[in-house]
Image: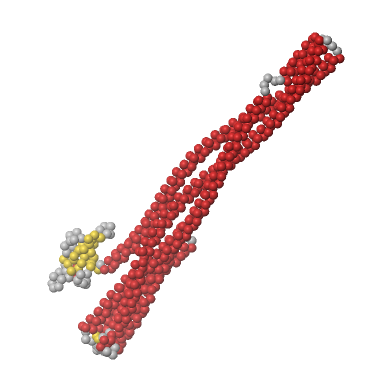
């Protein structure tokens, strides 16, 4: 099993030991352990000799607590830390995605609630329309009954007109027959049979002139019924006009409310776009803060390396007489100092290791910069073909990538300058080393004053850059939380306003639908009541005309009755002769 342990190398003849700190599980996870130390023996003790006291090592330990192999843990720990950092970044990204999903689910829940409210309102509206439909159906049945009654009255009037016409024709025929018989009676004396026949005919004529019923009374009854129907229709038409005025007032109010809702809706979208722009700016500043923090961390690491290098060089000056600091004691410099080939070679090796380490860091940052640039190009290509829903997220990613590229470029510029100076110093010292090796001269003094001056100059530049970055980071750290709170508050207000707009929109739609149905009902009533009123008016006009004709008929009947009485008197006189 693989363990992480701390190597303990006591002074003297005591054996080295491993203090176990953590062990690796089967799922590649690590757990802390609290176990006794394991003493190293044999080959493993010899391998431990190449590590320093207190070094962290990875040890493979069998079940009987025998150490099979040890190796350096620094590189593996760096890999684990990098993986852990990446996991943290992914976890942070997933937390942001989860938060977005939470907001989306909250919005969907509000939408479902709004839809339920709309469905409830529509259900109430359907119930109200059903009640209106039943009322309209009753009105339609009433109108149908009135139409049937009107048709019956029209048929009755037509029948009465026909009967009156037939009676008029019969009266004319009888009058003509009486006149003919009267003429014959004047020319000759009537017999008793003929006189009786004439008396019977005159009696029938008299009865036909005075019918049993009173047509005028019937016409007056019909006229009263028609007037009642006309008054009922006029009341319904007046009620219809009043409802039309009320409906027009509600329509005007609905139009005003809809225009006001459109203005608020347009203002809400403007606020939404402003908020999205502010959020994008906040994301950009957040990316700049992370980039500056990472840059500041690298500056601190470089300062630590510079300080370590300076301390090592200072110890060399203190420990070895042939190494001098010409910058502090006024020496003539490295060109005239004495130094041995071995010491100069050690110095060159140290400079080469520092240069290679710095070059590796710069190369890694360059690779990271190129990767960010490649990511930026890919995002820009995706933005060209993205849908409107995806554009916002892609634009935020582009802003973050641009901020990261800018921060890396700012960080690389001074590091590349320092790396170039270190390379020049390394080349100069290597040239001196080759010169000394070729001369095979005796050890001479070495002036490392220029190196210390260069280290001090680089340290001063790094301190200035550190101060600048600390100022920027402090400003961003103090302003970003306040801006985030403002954005969250604005987003909450916009969400509440959107919910209110959605509710108002549902209410406006329900009102508009109700108004459309109201106008449909009123137009249907108008299309039904006005023609019905005209038909009843036409029937009243026909009834008035019939009443006038009946009055003329009664007047002529009275005249004919008088003539009949005269004829009867004449017949009586003729019979008595």
Residue 534 picture quarter? top right
Answer above or below: position of 15 versus 95: below
Q: Position of residue 201 (x, y in %)?
A: 76, 15
- Report whether residue 357 is seen: no
Q: What's the coloring here?
A: secondary structure
Q: Position of residue 59 (x, y in %)?
A: 22, 64
Residue drawn at x 27%, y 66% as measured from the top left: 77
Answer above or below: position of 570 versus 112: above
Decide which of 402, 141 is in the foreground and name it: 141
Residue drawn at x 57%, y 33% as measured from the top left: 142
- Report whether residue 572 is seen: yes
Q: Position of residue 267 (x, y in %)?
A: 48, 58
> What is the quadrant of the N terminus in the image?
bottom left
Decide which of 3, 329 is in the foreground and name it: 329
Would you say 450 lies left or right of 567 here? Answer: left
Decide which of 203, 76 is in the foreground and name it: 203
> What is the quadrant of the C terminus in the image?
top right
Residue drawn at x 52%, y 53% as measured from the top left: 259
């Amino acid at each position: 099993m693989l363990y992480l342990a701390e190597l303990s190398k006591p002074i003297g003849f005591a054996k080295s030991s491993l203090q176990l700190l953590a062990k690796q599980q089967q799922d590649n996870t690590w757990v802390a352990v609290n176990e006794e130390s394991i003493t190293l023996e044999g080959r493993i003790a010899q391998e431990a000799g190449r590590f320093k006291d207190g070094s962290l090592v990875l040890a493979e330990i069998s079940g009987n607590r025998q150490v099979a192999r040890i190796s350096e843990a620094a590189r593996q720990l760096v890999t684990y830390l990098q993986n852990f950092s990446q996991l943290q970044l992914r976890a942070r990204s997933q937390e942001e995605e989860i938060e977005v999903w939470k907001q989306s689910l909250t919005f969907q829940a509000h939408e479902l609630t709004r839809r339920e409210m709309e469905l409830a309102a529509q259900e109430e509206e359907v119930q109200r329309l059903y009640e209106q439909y039943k009322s309209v159906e009753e009105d339609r049945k009433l109108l149908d009954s009135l139409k049937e009654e009107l048709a019956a009255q029209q048929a009755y009037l037509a029948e009465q007109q026909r009967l009156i016409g037939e009676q008029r024709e019969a009266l004319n025929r009888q009058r003509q027959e009486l006149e003919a018989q009267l003429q014959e009676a004047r020319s000759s004396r009537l017999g008793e049979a003929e006189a009786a026949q004439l008396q019977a005919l005159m009696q029938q004529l008299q009865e036909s002139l005075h019918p049993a019923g009173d047509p005028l009374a019937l016409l007056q009854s019909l006229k009263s019924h028609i007037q009642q129907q006309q008054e009922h229709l006029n009341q319904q038409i007046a009620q219809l006009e009043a409802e039309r005025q009320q409906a027009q007032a509600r329509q005007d109010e609905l139009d005003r409310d809809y225009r006001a809702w459109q203005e608020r809706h347009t203002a809400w979208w403007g606020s939404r776009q402003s908020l999205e722009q502010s959020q994008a700016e906040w994301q950009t500043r957040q990316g700049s803060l992370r980039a500056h923090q990472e840059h500041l961390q690298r500056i601190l690491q470089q300062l630590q390396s510079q300080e370590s290098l300076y301390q090592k060089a200072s110890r060399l000056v203190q420990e070895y007489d042939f190494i001098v600091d010409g910058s502090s004691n006024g020496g003539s410099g490295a060109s005239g100092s004495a130094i041995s080939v071995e010491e100069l070679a050690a110095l060159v090796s140290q400079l080469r290791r520092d240069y290679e380490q710095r070059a590796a860091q710069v190369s890694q940052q360059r690779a990271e910069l190129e990767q960010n640039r490649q990511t930026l190009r890919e995002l820009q290509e995706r933005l060209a073909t993205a849908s409107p829903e995806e554009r916002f997220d892609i634009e935020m990613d582009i802003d973050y990538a641009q901020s990261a590229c800018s921060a890396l470029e700012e960080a690389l510029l001074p590091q590349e300058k320092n790396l170039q100076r270190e390379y020049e110093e390394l080349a100069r010292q290597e040239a001196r080393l080759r010169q000394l090796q070729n001369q095979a001269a005796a050890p001479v003094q070495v002036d490392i004053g220029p190196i210390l001056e260069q280290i001090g100059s680089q340290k001063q530049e790094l301190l200035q850059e550190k101060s600048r970055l600390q100022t920027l980071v402090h400003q961003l750290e103090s302003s970003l939380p306040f801006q985030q709170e403002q954005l969250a508050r604005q987003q909450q207000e916009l969400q509440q306003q959107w919910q209110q707009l959605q509710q108002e929109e549902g209410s406006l739609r329900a009102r508009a639908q109700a108004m459309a149905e109201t106008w449909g009902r009123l137009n249907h009533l108008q299309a039904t009541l006005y023609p019905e009123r005209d038909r009843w008016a036409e029937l009243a006009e026909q009834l008035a005309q019939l009443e006038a004709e009946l009055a003329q008929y009664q007047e002529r009947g009275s005249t004919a009755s008088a003539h009949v009485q005269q004829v009867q008197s004449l017949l009586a006189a003729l019979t008595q002769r």
